[in-house]
Amino acid sequence: MLPTGGVPFLHEGGALMGAAPKHVWGRSLLKGQCAAADLHQPIAPPRRRLRATMEEYHRHCDECIDGVLGGEDYNQNNINQWTASIVEQSLTHLVKLGKAYKYIVTCAVVQRSAYGFHTASSCFWDTTSDGTCTVRWENRTMNCIVNVFAIAIVL
Amino acid sequence: MGCLRPRRTQGSPRIPIFCGPFSSKGGFRPSVVKDCIHAVLKEELANAEYSPEEMPQLTKRLSETVKDKLKEMGFDRYKMVVQVVIGEQRGEGVFMAARCFWDADTDNYIHDVFMNDSLFCVVAAFGCFYY
């Protein structure tokens, strides 16, 4: 669950293997509570546009992962190429969208097993302009989690 | 007539020239951040054992703790992202990769890995300068 307004900076994103996939994105921030935004009024995109942007990222990343891992089985020899392809293609797609963001894309590919795997992230940013999206993908032999963090460039 | 220097408009941010990742004066210094993350991992995970009920909370708590410690370190005008991954240590294959599109003069990242007999933990911290 996303935190309520009493915790301005906290953004939690997580994916637990076996849980339903969820999108996570930044939440509205009360003015003045973000140290970074205190400097001057940020030129933040409206919240609807931020959500739409995150959904667009989600679609792109899903297609990237499908293109690289679709139909493949976990293979230790190829895994580094695959993860590198996924992050590079995702990043290229995101940059081509031409929005004023800095991007951080991380990808973790895990062999599918009975053993647990947990991931969480915590961000200190302006939740009105910055956002994240998490894509979970799986097939018979492996699970893939891609996180995209988009940090607005305000000049 | 005297020499007129152009004045900055009031309120426009100055970008410090020394604000780079490897500068001794400013920036998201990898060595300092790595020490901080290492200390947090040692403190939180020294005697930790993997258990499916506790790991989700531990993962979230770790990410918040690392983020709070980095905030205390006073990286002025840096937005930070901390990602924590914890898995059971059973020999299953895991591979992680990250790519960033940012300003390499001001932004940087650091990662650290902790392993014991029952779990492994990877923490990655990314710092982006806010112009």
Image (tube, coloured by chain):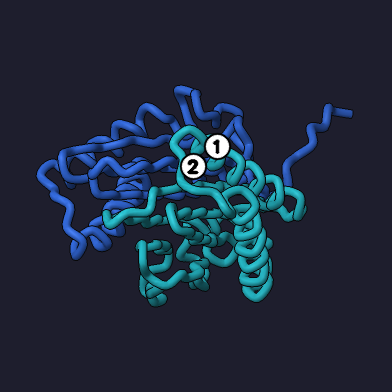
Chain colours: A cyan, B blue
Is residue B63 or residue B86 the one in the foreground? B86
Q: Residue at x 40, y 48 (%)?
A: A110
Q: Where is residue A35 in the image (x, y as percent from the top left)?
A: 47, 56
Are the residues tagged 2 and 1 within 8 Å (C-beta)?
A: yes
Which residue is pictured at 23% across the width and 41% down the height? B41
Residue B123 lies in quadrant: top left
Nearer-the-camera pick, A27 or B96: B96
Chain on which label 2 sits:
B
Q: Position of residue B75 (x, y in %)?
A: 43, 41
> The residue tagged with tag 1: helix, strand or loop?
loop
Q: Quadrant of residue A152?
A: bottom right
State the image coordinates of residue A72 (x, y, percent, origin top left): 54, 49
Which residue is located at x 49 percent, y 24 percent?
Answer: B22
Number of dots carrying numbers: 2
Is A14 left or right of A105, judged from the image as shown? left
In the picture, measured across the screen, residue B105 lies left or right of residue A100, that is left
Identify which residue, A21 or A52, lies in the foreground.
A21
Residue indicated by mark 2 = B127
Secondary structure under tag 2 reads strand
Q: Mark 1 lies on which chain?
A: B
Instruction: Specify the amino acid type for callout 2.
Output: Gly
Q: Which of B119 and B84 is in front in this view?
A: B119
Residue A22 is tagged as none
Query: Does B71 sit above or below residue A23?
Result: above
* Among the two numbered marks 2 and 1 on one chain, the one whose residue lies closer to the N terminus: 1
Q: Identify which residue is drawn at 31% across, 47% down.
A: B66
Q: Is residue B5 left or right of residue A148?
A: right
Image x and y of residue B21, in percent: 51, 29
Cα separation between marks 2 and 1: 6 Å
When the figure is inspected, residue A124 is found, relative to residue A76, above or below; the finding is: below
